[in-house]
Amino acid sequence: MNTIKQLLSEIEGSYFEEYTELDQEVNQLEYFSGHLKRMKDYSKTMFVCITNERRQYINQMRPVKWADGNDQIKGKENQFALIVTEHPIEDPSVTTPQFIVKDSWRFLLEFANKMRQNFKKPVIAITGSAGKTSTRMMITHAFKEEKVLENRGNHNVRFAIPLYLGQLVGDFDLLNLEVSLNALNTYDTGSMSDLIQPDIAIVTSIGEAHLSSLKTTNNVAYYKSKIFDGLKENGTAIINTDMGAEELAILVQAAEKKTTDILTYSLYDTSRVVHVSSIEQKKEYCEVGVHFFDQKIKIRLSVPSSGMISNALATLIAIWKIKGDVSAYISAFETFRPLPKVLEKSFYSNEPTFTFIDDTHNASLPSMKNAIEYFKAVRPFYEGKSILVLGQIADLGNTSASIHQQVMEELTDVPADHVFGYGEHFRELFNEQSKHKQNYQWFETLPELTQSIQQQLTNDSLVLAKGSVTGSDFHEIDKYIRRFSFKEMA
């Protein structure tokens, strides 16, 4: 049992006043009132009050909407076991012990480090231009019978990492974190991998993301390679080799500085210790044959894009490193579901019947290619019209034109009756293509786009939408789809 007195020993700060009850158990940590639920008991929770000044600092001095932690819990102070704050709450009705610190962010880092040093069970850290969230969720799903601590949603930035490490104050069997590039850059304390100290570090992909700031995929690889900085002695590096040779070399060289246990996987390269040997596509799932070290195994995936298959390979290796055998976990892949809007499938039964696959959670060039390949694979299972809808990729900077041109090149043999484009970065490309191919069309607004989709539908149609969640309102396409579908049912 972790008590207030034990947890704060050797931590810089002081109690607001003398407290007689410091043997209170603490098994949870929070810093944002938005995560608090009405009916939950927080009598064993430490609440760290992050000031607006500290929050902006973590955001590299850019303005951010954040209420001072003291204000967030006003009127709720006595619900907690402990309050950590820079500014004492002097209201005499507040009886919860207060620990006063000079810098709430530095306290959080120090406390997170202490919890990490005390945690002796496996720690996984995952990064990549695409696939890190789905891989993290897949690993957690595989270990659903155990108590896994993981990110909320895709909360994976610098500000997030110490929160989850601090939550190791609870009783967990595994820490499973996805880590964004924001948490691996040189700002503040540098790579958060040094704080995480993973036993297993995974890189799922390197692709055309963050290019507005990093300019090249080599730079993306360099910063993603920092996931290995904090790798524990005798730790394991797991790397997807399906990327450019230079980018892969950057990752491998960084991993080699920390460990000799480097395991690689690939969809295509049969020289890798884990690779795909066969894929049999069905309408609702695919069966994947995997060459797994010296074994041949088969898994079923209900979300069977090439990206998800690649994520499954990383998951299999992580399971094997932790458990030594994967056989008991094979069935978990068939029941796995990723985040909403990640190849999320909805069937609309009113005529004309159609299936809508929403993949607007986010987009990069690799994930765009994955979505197009998935569309090609499942198209034969639908007898009606097929419509591929592409929204622009955000955060590409000066490379935007060339990246979007590469997306267009992927459409050469796509078996779509209609290919619709959305977003300014696709305007000229689609307008040019439509001069030669009548089934290509660009739209300026979502109402116009979805009206055209509605007009083209026939029974058993397929509609797949892929694009970035930022930079436009494209991610709201599902609302318009539901609106016209339900209207027809009325």
Image (cartoon, helix red, strand yellow):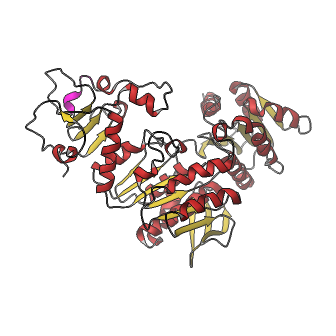
Front one among 222 and 392 = 222
Residue sticking out furthest to the left: 20
Q: Position of residue 4 (x, y in %)?
A: 18, 43
At x 49%, y 53%, the residue is: 136
At x 52%, y 63%, the residue is: 257
Q: Is residue 466 above or below residue 122?
A: above
Front one among 406 and 481 = 406
Decide if residue 326 is on the left or right side of residue 403: left
Start-end of magenta stretch:
74-79
Q: Is residue 73 above or below residue 309?
A: above
* Residue 36 visible to an observer of this rendering: no
Residue sticking out furthest to the right: 436
At x 81%, y 33%, the residue is: 441
Residue sticking out furthest to the top: 91
Q: Position of residue 330 (x, y in %)?
A: 49, 67
Front one among 448 and 380 = 448
Decide if residue 203 is on the left or right side of residue 97: right
Q: Which quadrant does the C terminus fall into?
A: top right
Residue sticking out furthest to the bottom: 294
Instruction: State the image quarter where residue 166 is shown.
Output: top left
Q: Position of residue 414 (x, y in %)?
A: 80, 49
Q: Is residue 32 above or below residue 158?
A: above
Instruction: State the image quarter where residue 475 is shown.
Output: top right
Q: Is residue 253 magenta?
A: no
Q: Position of residue 20 (x, y in %)?
A: 7, 37
Decide if residue 453 is on the left or right side of residue 322: right
Front one among 363 and 434 = 363
